[in-house]
Image (tube, helix red, strand yellow):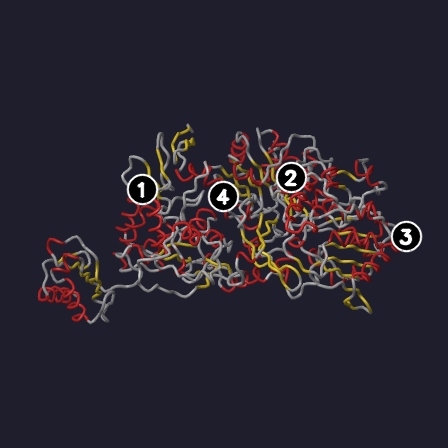
Amino acid sequence: MPDVNITVDGKKVTAPAGTLLIEACKSVGIEVPSFCYYPNLSLQGACRMCLVKVEKMPKLQTACTTVISEGMAVTTDSPEIHQARKSMVELVLGNHPLDCPVCDAGGECELQDMTFSYGAAESKYIEPKNHREEQQWSPVVYFDRPRCILCYRCVRVCGEGMDVWALGVQNRGVSSIIAPNKEDHLECEECGMCIDICPVGALTSGAYRYKTRPWEMKHVGTTCTHCADGCKTTLGVRRSDSGMEIVRGDNRDKSGINGDFLCIKGRYGFDFADHAERLKQPMIRKDGRLTPSTWEEAFELIGREFSRVQQQDGGQAIGVVGSNRTTNEESYLLQKFARVVLGTNNIDHHRTADFPALAAALTGKPDLTASMRDVFNAPAILLIGNDPTNQHPLLAWQIRNNVRLHGARLYLVNAEPIKLERQATSVTQVPSGAEGRVAAFLAGDDSAADALTGNTNREGWIALRDKLRSEANLIIIFGSEIRGGDVSSLVKFTLNIQGAKLVCLADYANSRGAADMGLYPDLLPGYQPVAQASKFHEEWGAVPQTRGLTLPEMVESARTGKLKAWYVVGANPIGRFAIDPYVFSKSFVVVQDMFLTETAAMADVVLPAANAYEKSGTFTNTCGDLQVVKKAGEVSEVKPDFEMIVRIAAAMGFDVRQLVPFGPGTRMDMGQSRGAQSGEADRHAVWLEARGLEPKMSPFDPTAILDEIQRLVPGYDVPRINLLAGNDQHTSLSQSGPGAAQNPKLIVAAKDDLFSSGTLGRYSRALNSVMENHRNQPAESDVVAD
Amino acid sequence: MRFSEQFEQRFTEMLGHYPTKRSVLVPTLLYAQDEAGFLSDEIIHEIAGRLDLTDLEVRNVISYYSMLTTKPRGKYNVQVCTNIACMLRGGEELLEHCSKKLGIGHKGTTADGLFSLEEVECIGACSWAPAVQVNYDFHENLTTVKMDKILDGYKSKV
C-alpha cells in the first residue's frame, strides 16, 4: 500500500494507506486513550475516549475509526479535547461503583488510569447508582454488571478471536448489558480471555477474585506447563507459609508468542501446586509401606542401590524414564546421567510425535520448520490430522486469526469433523488411520489415493494436491497420525513447494525438548545415534554405544527379572500405558514426582519434585521455539528434578563436575554488600548470564547445562540474550544428527482436550470444576434435536 | 418449525437483496412474529440456524428492537404514544384510560388474551396527536370516548 503523510501534534507521520489514526499516532509514541478500541478486533467506536481534533473537520473525531488521509493535520491534546475526554469519563463513572478498594482490577484498571489522567473525580450526577448483584457465569468467569463500561471488547474477542460467540449485548441505550449465551451462564471454551481484555473489573476470574491486590504480587512471565504450544503465562505470586504461592495466571505480559491469547490451562491450571495430596517429603518403602523419611537417607539409599545394581549386573540392568514436562536442562542432564553415570542407554519417555523421523528427513536441508509466529502470517496452511482447538489452543488461535485478519487459505485433511472447518477453504475427509497415506499421496504416490477415497474422489485429491503445490510459503502442520516414513514423504512434498515449512505436533509442554535432548535409547541429544562417534562421546568419555531398551522393552526386561532398577523422573508409565504394576514390584524403583501416581505408589523411594512453575530452565515448544522457564512459585519442601539427579550422582560417588560443568567456585560479591545498590549487581548478573559468563558456582545451576546444550546440541546455539529477555528463539533441525527409525507404535497420543492435562489436570481444582460443570450442563449441541 | 408458504417466499426473495445473510435478520424476525405472535425459542433457533448466527446474536437483536418480542402478546397490541406531541394532546390520559378499561398496565396482557397494552415512543403521527397504534392500524385525534369505541370494535371482531 502507498504511504500517507500526516501531521500529529506537529510531528510528521508516515504510515501505509488504510492505517487507523489511533495506530498512526501510536507508531510515533503518541498515546490516544481508548477503552473500546483493541488492535485486531473489529471497530466499535463506543467509548468516545479517543476524540481528537482533525483540521477542517467541524467536530472532534474518533481516532479509532478514522482512517488517515494525505495531509491530515491532527491535534491529540488541547483544552477542548481534554474536556471532551473528561466528560466521557464522567459519563462512564455515572453508574460505575466506586468499589475500587475491593475490586480485583483496582491498581491495574484502565478506568482508574483514565480518571487519574483526566480528572472527573467530581460529578454532576446525583442520581443513586443502579446496583446489581454479581453473577457467576461459569466456575471461572464472574460478571459484576454495574462495573461494566460497555466497551464490547469481551464480546468481540470471544466471537472474532475465539470463534466461540458466547457473549452478546442485550437491550439498547442505557439498558444495554453484556449477556452470556445461556441466559444465566456461559457455554464456552472457558479461555477467560474476556477477563483479560476487560478494561475494568466487570469480568473477574473465579480463581483469583477477592484474593489479593495486583501490587502485592510479583509477576513472573514464564512458559506454560500444559500443552506443547508454549504460551507465555504471567504468574502472580505472593509469599506464603512455605515459600511462594501462585495466586493467578494471566496474560498481563503480552510479549509471548501467544500475543493476546491464553487458554484455560495457562490461566487457571496452576493450582495443582498447592493440592492437598502434593508430596512434600521423601518416602522410603519400609516393611512394604512407603514411610516418610529424610532427603539424606533417601539419596544415600538410592546411591547405594544404583551402585550395587550397576556393579553386579551392569548399567543395562537399570531403566530410566524421562519426562515431557521437565526442562531441557533436566532432560539433557537425565540422559547424560543415565549414559555417563549409570552407564546405560536404557532411557525413554512417553512419545507423542515422531520427531526422530522429522530430524532424519530434515538434516542437511535448509531450515524447513515453521515457528509458532509464522503460523499467524503464512499465506496458506495445510493441516493434516489433530484437532488444534482442543489439543493446541494457541495453534488454533494463530490459524483462525490468520484466516480472519490476513485472509490465509486453510486446507484441512482430517478423519473427524473439527471446529477449524469454519475457517477452512477446503475440507477433505479421510478414513481414520489413513492420514499417513495422505503424505504418500502428496509426495507423488498416486496409488495411495485409492486408500484415501476407495476410488471415488480421485480427481478431488489430485486437484487438492495441485492446488497445494502452487501455494508458495505454505505451512504444513501434521499431528501424530503421521509417523515414520510418512514424515519423510511429507518432507519430500514440502521441498517441492517454494518456501514451504513444517510443524510437527506433539502433546506436552516439553515433548519436543525431551526428544531434542535425547530421551531415546538409541539417540543422543540432537538425534545423534549412540553408535556413531560424536562430540558427545568426545566430551563425556565412555558412553555405551549399543542401543538401549525402549520403554516396553524395559517393562518386558523387568518382567523377566533382568532389569533390576528403575529411575522414573516426572512420568507415570503404569497409569499412562496400563502396565501391570507387578512388573515394577520386583525391581528397585525410584520415582520423582509431585503426586503419588500409580507408578510412584509402586516405588521404593519417592522424591517430591518441583513443577515447572517452581524452577528455572528452558522449554522447546512443538514448533521448536526455545523459551525460558522462570521460577515463580516455591514450595520449600520439594526439590527440582535437576538438583535430585545431581544429588543421586553424588551419592553414587560420582564426581558431579563431570556431570554438570559448573565453575571453579570463586568467591564473589553478589550484591549483598552493596545495600541499596544491590539492583546494580542484578544488572551485572543479567549481562553476564546473557553472555554465558556468569559464575556457575553450584552444581545445581541449570545454566551450566544450558551452556553445554547450546554448545553441543545442533540448532540450539541461539542468541542467549534474546532467550533470557523472554523472547522465543526458533531452533533448527537442519544440522541435527541423522536420527534413527523408530517403532511408530511407541507413539501414544495424549488425547488431552481443552480441560484435561495428564497428571497435572487430575490435580487441578479449576480444570476439574469446569469439567464437572460441563458434565452437569451438557451442551445443547450434544442433545439430539427434534 | 414450519412457517407459511408466503413467509418462505419472502425469506428466499430477501436473501438475494443483501450482500450478507445476516442482513435479512430484522425483517425475517418481524414476519415470523406476525405469523406466530411472538418469537419463541424455537423460532429463534430456527432463524439463527438459517442465517449462520448463534441464538445469542438473534436474541441480542430482538432485545434491541422494542417492536420485537419473545413473550406472547394479546391478539390486539394497543400501543399508546406518550411522546411530546401526544402527551400535550392527552396521550398520558389516554394511556391511563386504556389501562383502567383493560385492567392491565404497560406491557400487560388481558386474561382472555385479546389485548396487550404498551406505552410507546413517537409513532410518527404527531400531526394527528394523540395517536394509538393497534397492531399495524393507526387511530388518530383520539379522545377517551373514541378510544372506547375502538376497543369495543376490536372486541366485537372476535
In the shown orientation, is residue A672 left or right of residue A647?
Answer: left
| Label 2 to label 1: alpha-carbon separation | 45 Å
In which chain is the residue bearing label 4? A
Q: To which residue does mark 2 refer?
A: A721
| Label 1 to label 3: alpha-carbon separation | 84 Å
Residue flagged by tag 4: what amino acid is it? Answer: Arg
Quarter in which the N terminus of chain A is drawn: top left
Residue flagged by tag 1: what amino acid is it? Answer: Leu
Q: To which residue does mark 3 refer?
A: A311
Which numbered disc, 4 or 3, marks the residue that appears first in the sequence?
A: 3
Q: Residue at x 27, y 53 (%)?
A: B30
Which numbered disc, 1 or 3, marks the residue that appears first in the sequence?
A: 1
Q: Residue at x 91, y 54 (%)?
A: A312
Q: To which residue does mark 4 refer?
A: A400
Discs 2 and 3 lie in a common subunit:
yes
**Pointer 2: residues within 10 angstroms few (<14), some, or many (20+)?**
some
Which numbered disc, 2 or 4, marks the residue that appears first in the sequence?
A: 4
Residue flagged by tag 2: what amino acid is it? Answer: Ile
Where does residue A732 sit, x and y in percent of width and height? 66, 36
